[in-house]
C-alpha cells in the first residue's frame, strides 16, 4: 500500500501539470509498461472499441473536434483493455491533459492527419496480440506528438517563431 501511495503521489502532480506519465512494470519483468498488455488481454469487444475509435478518427479528416473526440476514445479504450482498473480510471483523470496536447499538436497544419497512420500501427499490433510491437508503435506515436508540440511551441501556430520553451521530457 505504501508503494501505491508513493506512486500516486508522484504521478498526480505530473498529470495536473499536463505532463505525460507512463507506468512500467518492475524492472525484472522487461519493463514493458502495463499499457501495452492491452495487446495480450483485450477481448474482441475491446479490440472493436479501439478499432471504432480509430476509424472515427480516420474518417474525421480535418475536423479537429471530431478527430480529437475519437483520439480520446482510442486511448481510453486501450486503457480499459489493459484490465487494470487503476489505469482505466486514470483515463478520465488525464482526459483534459490529453485533449489539450491533441489540440496543441493540431495547431501545426496536417498534424491530425499525420497521426492517423501512427494510431493505425498501434491498433494493428493490439489486434495481433503483439505487446512489444504495440509498445514500440505507441512510443513512436507519443514521440512524434511530443516533437510536434515542441515545434508548435517554438514556431507558433502556422510556423510563426515565438520564444523557445523548456524542452519537453522524453517519454
Image (cartoon, grey):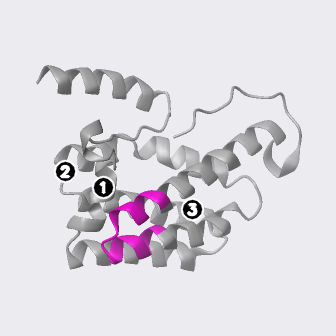
SS at mark 2? loop
Marks 2/1: CA–CA distance = 8 Å
Q: In this view, does 57 lie to the left or right of 114?
A: left
Q: Residue beneath label 1, please?
A: 79
Q: Is residue 112 magenta?
A: no
The quarter of the image holding the N terminus is top left
Q: Residue beneath label 3, please?
A: 65
Q: Residue at x 38, y 61 (%)?
A: 132
Mark nearer the N terminus (2 vs 1)? 1
Residue 48: name its quadrant.
bottom left
Residue 151: image location, x then y, percent: 76, 44
Q: Is residue 159 left or right of residue 69?
A: right
SS at mark 3? helix
Q: Give the range drawn in magenta.
A: 122-136
119 or 68: which is nearer to us?
A: 119
Counting other residues with Cα less than 10 Å from the Cα at mark 2, is it few (<14), some (14-19), or many (20 or more)? Answer: some
Marks 3/1: CA–CA distance = 21 Å
SS at mark 1? helix
44 or 125: which is nearer to us?
A: 125
Residue 108: name its quadrant.
bottom right
Specify the farthest residue to the left: 1
Marks 3/2: CA–CA distance = 29 Å
Q: Does the magenta stretch include residue 132?
A: yes
Counting other residues with Cα less than 10 Å from the Cα at mark 1, is it few (<14), some (14-19), or many (20 or more)? Answer: many
Which numbered circle lies on residue 165? none
Q: Residue beneath label 2, please?
A: 84
Q: Which residue is drawn at 27% across and 58% down?
A: 37
Nearer to us: label 3 or label 2:
2
Amino acid at each position: 500500500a505504501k508503494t501505491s501511495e508513493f506512486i500516486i503521489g508522484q504521478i498526480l502532480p505530473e498529470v495536473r501539470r499536463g505532463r505525460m506519465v507512463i507506468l512500467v512494470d518492475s524492472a525484472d519483468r522487461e519493463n514493458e509498461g502495463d499499457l501495452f498488455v492491452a495487446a495480450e488481454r483485450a477481448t474482441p469487444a475491446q479490440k472493436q472499441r479501439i478499432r471504432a475509435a480509430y476509424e472515427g478518427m480516420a474518417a474525421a479528416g480535418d475536423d479537429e473536434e471530431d478527430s480529437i473526440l475519437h483520439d480520446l476514445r482510442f486511448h481510453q479504450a486501450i486503457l480499459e483493455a489493459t484490465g487494470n482498473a487503476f489505469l482505466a480510471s486514470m483515463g478520465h483523470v488525464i482526459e483534459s491533459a490529453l485533449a489539450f496536447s491533441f489540440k496543441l499538436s493540431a495547431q501545426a497544419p496536417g498534424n491530425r492527419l499525420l497521426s492517423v497512420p501512427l494510431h493505425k500501427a498501434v491498433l494493428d499490433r493490439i489486434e495481433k496480440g503483439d505487446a512489444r510491437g504495440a509498445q514500440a508503435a505507441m512510443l513512436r506515436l507519443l514521440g512524434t506528438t511530443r516533437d510536434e508540440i515542441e515545434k508548435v511551441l517554438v514556431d507558433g501556430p502556422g510556423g510563426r517563431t515565438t520564444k523557445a520553451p523548456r524542452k519537453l521530457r522524453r517519454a
